Image (cartoon, grey):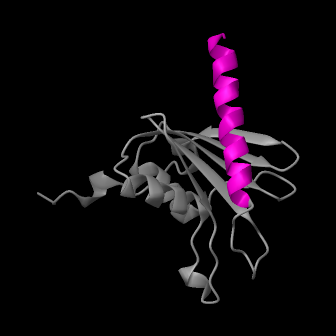
Amino acid sequence: MSRGATRKKRISDLLRLAKAARLRAWAPYSRFRVGAALLARSGKVYTGANVENASYGLSLCAERVAFARAVSEGERKFSALAVVTGSREPATPCGACRQTLLEFGTDMRVYCANLKGDLLEDRASGLLPRRFGRGHLRKPR
């Protein structure tokens, strides 16, 4: 299989897993189901679905659920994230999820798709170009 074909298969597999995770979302308030599939550099994939709460601020996004699962299993390096929604246009991660993505690297590929198969692709750094990061937390001189 060529490198391009391998890349397309990897993206397709991630999107398929994100789409399946979307079906497990708990979204009784917004009815906006989101599924995510996070590819660790180890090769393992961690999925997540959004989990809403009547106290909206306590809701969890699918992307952050996937990151929490991966990090709790010891993963720290990631190469790609796929997000699938049922929206007319592919939806990109919210600001909190973008900040979470960037905590683990700026080169991570992000694939956002809807159920029709429309696809947006970017790097984590492209989603939040003027981000807050570790460098801002260094002690002042």
Spot occupied by residue 96 in the image (x, y as percentages of width and height): 52, 64
> Is 49 on the left or on the right of 114, as rendered?
left
2 w.r.t. 39: above or below = above
Residue at horizontal 61%, vertical 62%?
A: 62
List the single residue furthest toward the left. Answer: 141
Image quadrant where residue 91 sits = bottom right
Point out the residue furthest to the bottom here.
55
- Quarter holding the N terminus is top right
Q: Which residue is drawn at 54% across and 82% down?
A: 58
| Position in image of residue 11 (x %, y %) | 67, 33
Residue plotted at (72% across, 52% down): 20
Measured along the vertical axis of the image, is residue 6 above or below residue 40?
above
**Residue 127, how many percent across, how many down?**
58, 48
Q: In this view, does 74 lie above or below 26?
A: above
Point out residue 77 in the picture as x, y percentages from the top left corner: 39, 41
Dominant secondary-structure state across the stretch colored magenta: helix
Tell me if 135 is positioned left or right of 53 in this view. Answer: left
Identity of the residue drawn at 60% across and 48% down: 37
Specify start and end residues of the magenta stretch as a single range. Answer: 1-22
